[in-house]
Image (cartoon, rainbow, N blue to C red):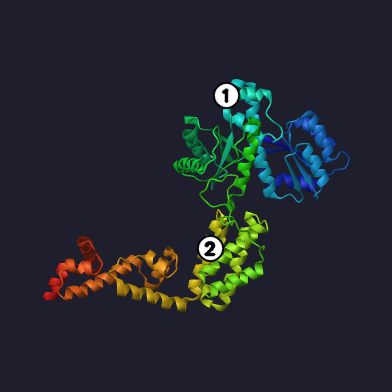
Amino acid sequence: MIKVLIVDDEPKLREGLKSIVPWSELGYEVVDTAANGNEALEKHKRYAPDVMLVDIRMPGMDGLQLIEAVRSVDPAIHLLILSGYADFDYAKRAISHRVDGYLLKPVDEDELSAYLMQMKETIEQERQWMALNQAASEISREQLIQSWLRQEQEAGVDAASRQLAEQLGLAWDHYQVALVYVHGSDESSDEPDRLLKEKLVEAFEREGSGIVFSLHGFLGLLMPVPVLSASGRKELQDRLETAASAAGAAITAAMGQPVREAADTVKSYHAAKKLLRRRFFYAPGELLYPESVPFGGENGAEPSEGYEPGPFMEQLYYAVDVGNADIQQKLLRSAALGMIRDQYTEGDMKSAFVELLTSVHNKLTLHHTELQSRTKEYSDRIAAIFRQRTVFDLCRHSAQFLEELVWQAGRGGRDQEMKRILDLIQRNYSDNIKLETLASVFNYNSAYLGKMFKNTTGEYFNTYLDKVRIDKAKDFLKQGMKVYQVAEKVGYTNVDYFHSKFKKYVGTSPSNYRKELEL
């Protein structure tokens, strides 16, 4: 367990911090609390904590003075600063003392937990590294890479590390970092990451094309040969996807720029990490790299205006009300571009889309009462916005939701359109009619048209088409036509297939049916 000492002059806050997060579940133990700097120094000597949470403003010895005193005797300790208000000067001084985080009161549970999880990983890696330093022969290439990537970008690589790199075969001419983010991985289990790591080792290390490592929640690959061309990126993406598929994982990957020195690998790492943290704004299924084009940059055009919720909602409502799918899609794209221009985060953008679609739905419901019975279904669809992985997926999901609203809100008009579809089938049953073709003709998503077809007719599309054909076949058999002629006339190119369909729906074969008519 990682030992924690909480230092704050407010008793209620000290007790609150002891219960705000599940310390033991996160791998921590609160060994004690202290009300001031002097008491904290005494308890630091007694418990030798790994982490201290320190209030920056305390009577007597303040938080920064305490940090200086503790750092002088314990350089490796991890520190989180607590402050009642944003104080830039204090923050700058705290950073100079290498604190791990700066939290404003009241402390947010999620923010504190995030810091603790990150520190836990760092502390565990530091413990491993210390153990390996005691037995240098056991130091692995992965751990050396991790030490390079955990350093500050200006820190450089010392002589001992360079010598160790030569011993471990890592003295390369070039270095380039690729990082892999595993979607939907359970943070309480490392199983998906472990399996994927094994597959990546098989795919890259065994043929000498890279070293696999784990760091800060990512899987990574340090490569000795720069990947610069589009074909090289495509090959790397394919190899990563193959490994992910074998591990049953869905991934997004990014790579930083190639560098010439081991000391600069941290720059390549941070570039890749920055791209992954912005992965929501890039097309799915692509290997991200420093020149990757985000959403909206495909045509070189930038939005001229930001996002104004009121006007966008009004325009989108009218587009839905008249059933103009093209305008709906353009407006959704414009909204996303405006939000990007206004520097919305992923969470901000999803929340804004929820507000936008909810407003359109609510206004539409006022004029189309038939929508009220489906409110729960629509609420679920809107909530699914938060599960979209990219802005492309977000716009696509939103467009599909609006398409459903259009269908339901204009059900009288859509009933007429469904009659046209059924009439088309009745007149063209002998053709090779497919649901996808009808969806294209009538400007619908094929899956959604299939759903609406079932709701209207009570039958799936293929079943309905088969029944129309069999009914027509019965008429032709009554006219004395031969079975193979009837099969061809109603759209079945294979007589045996026609025979099986006829028997399925009529209960007897075409030949027997015709004989029964002759009796």
Considering every residue shown, the one lying at the far left of the view is: 519
Q: Is residue 196 above or below residue 170?
A: below
Which of the marked residues, 1 or 2, is nearer the chain's N terminus?
1
x then y, percent, for residue 278: 61, 49
**Residue at point 58% right, 29% down?**
173
Quick one: SS at disc 1? loop
Kindly indicate the quadrant of the structure image that contains residue 82: top right
Q: Is residue 388 above or below residue 256?
A: below
Given residues 14 and 208, the one toward you in this image is 208
Disc 2 marks a residue whose amino acid type is Arg
Kindly indicate the quadrant of the structure image that contains residue 177: top right
x then y, percent, for residue 438: 38, 68
Disc 1 marks a residue whose amino acid type is Leu
The quarter in which the C terminus is drawn is bottom left
Q: Report whether 282 appears left or right of 158.
A: left
The quarter in which the N terminus is drawn is top right
Q: Residues within 10 Å of mark 1 (few under 14, many from 20)?
A: few
Considering every residue shown, the one lying at the far right of the view is: 60
Asked if marks 1 and 2 touch (Cβ < 8 Å), the reply is no
Q: Is residue 55 visible?
A: no
**Residue at point 47% right, 37% down?**
199
Q: Is residue 315 visible?
A: yes
Q: Residue 168's mark?
A: 1
Q: Is residue 348 above or below residue 189?
A: below
Distance Cα–Cα, label 1 vs label 2: 53 Å
Tag 2 residue: 381
Q: Report whether 4 appears left or right of 137.
A: right
Quick one: SS at disc 2? helix
